[in-house]
Amino acid sequence: MIEHFRVSHVVAGFVSVLVGYASSAVIVLQAAEVAGATLAQQISFMWALGIGMGIATIALSVRYKAPVLAAWSTSGAALLVTALTGASLAEAIGAFLLSSALLLAVGLLGWTDVILRYVPRSVAAAMLAGVLLRFGTGMFGVPASDLALVLVMVAVYLLGKRRMPNYAVLASVGAGALIALINPGLHLDKVQLSLAGPVFTWPEFSPAVLIGAGVPLFLVTMSSQNLTGMATLRAHGYQTPASPLIGSLGATGLVLGAAGGFAYSVAAISAAVCMTDDAEPDPKRRYLVTIWAGIFYVLAGIFAATVVGLLAALPRTLVLAITGVALLATISNSLAAAAHDERERDAAILTFLCTASGMSLWGVGSAFWGLMLGIAVTQLYRLTAVRPS
């Protein structure tokens, strides 16, 4: 192992983890807060995610000799911010475990293609866009005195997309943090280096929360995270089998879900950092880069209390801006995918509007109903399609 050591491996592994945390850790904490998690439980969320992602990344990278990087489901966390409104933490844990159990089942049975055949990509994308819409608009709903911060971060992000797309969000977050440091809005005096540990919560299985949060979390993690992550691996020439990866990450969620590990998936954007020639010119040795990323994940989990303290010190406007900027690409890609197939466009727009409405029926949130509406319209159009004689 020593003879294979490169500084570039360490740097790329660290940057990939930093990109993931800087762009979406605040969304994870927002989801925990909505579920009523205490500070200790929020720290447990970050502990479970860091430890779970780290161990899964190292184990899968070594097993398949490929740069497999685990990640939390950013889109899933954003969905939970909406779907868990009114739910208790115990009910939220029940939804996490259901989602992870479904991921494990799909992995064991190899049902990835079967599941996605009944959920058109355009409908899944429209549901995701509807869920994320509030985060995009939220960063422009800040006080007028703080709007300059948002505009600077958006400008840095857009410029970064042109020059260094993999680091655009990181650059935007850095610019926002610098402005917050200059202005008296960033309070780092109470941030201390301290160790963290898990806080396990006994799950409750509420049908409304399972249907309204657990099932959509599973579908979003599959469609927007795992498939994108597998596509990234394929694009770089790795033919790593999908089912064992998805099943392993589902099993990780079952083990750590009660501590706050809500959803584990195959990383895409942050994983791409580990697959460049700068990180490692030999594709067969790039798994060494993700092993280092796994080590940094574990360290982030061990020091989760410090991570949470740092995020809690951020001004609210900066948090809203980070969240919005981090999800801009996902919102854009989701809207494009939703409107791509003209035959499914009606189903997609109805899914988007229903999901974005925030409606609740029988205690089940809008993400589920938007998805069901989209699937129903798609099937109706298929059944009533005019066939050539």
Image (cartoon, grey):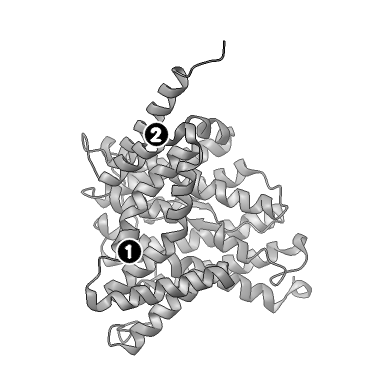
Q: Residue at x 33, y 51 (%)?
A: 80
Q: Where is mark 2, residue-wise?
A: 346
Residue 198 appears in the rendering: no
How far across and down, in percent of the image, does residue 173 sit? Answer: 43, 74
Q: Is residue 260 above or below residue 100?
A: below
Badge 1, how many Cα within 10 Å: few under 14, some, many 20+?
Answer: many
Instruction: Report x, y in % for residue 240.
Output: 68, 48
Secondary structure state at the residue bearing disc 1: helix
Extreme front residue here?
389
State how far apart marks 1 and 2 are (Cα).
Answer: 40 Å
| Foreground residue among 309 and 180 | 180
Q: Secondary structure at mark 2?
A: helix
- Which residue is drawn at the image coordinates 36% and 61% (left, top)? 27
Q: Nearer the viewer, residue 273 or 375?
A: 375
Quadrant showing the N terminus: bottom right
Between residue 277 and residue 141, name the one nearer to us: 141
Report which residue position mark 1 lands on.
42
Labelled pair 1, 2 in contact (Cβ < 8 Å): no
Residue 383 in the image: state x and y as whole percent: 45, 18
Figure check: 267 above or below 109: below
Identify whether 245 is placed above or below 377: below
* Left or right of 327 in this view: 116: right
Q: Is residue 5 left or right of residue 60?
A: right
Task: Specify the label residue 217 is tagged with.
Answer: none
Residue 42: x percent and y percent? Answer: 32, 63
Disc 2 marks which amino acid?
Asp
Give the residue drawn at x 68%, y 76%.
8
The image quarter containing residue 2 is bottom right
Whether residue 49 is visible: yes
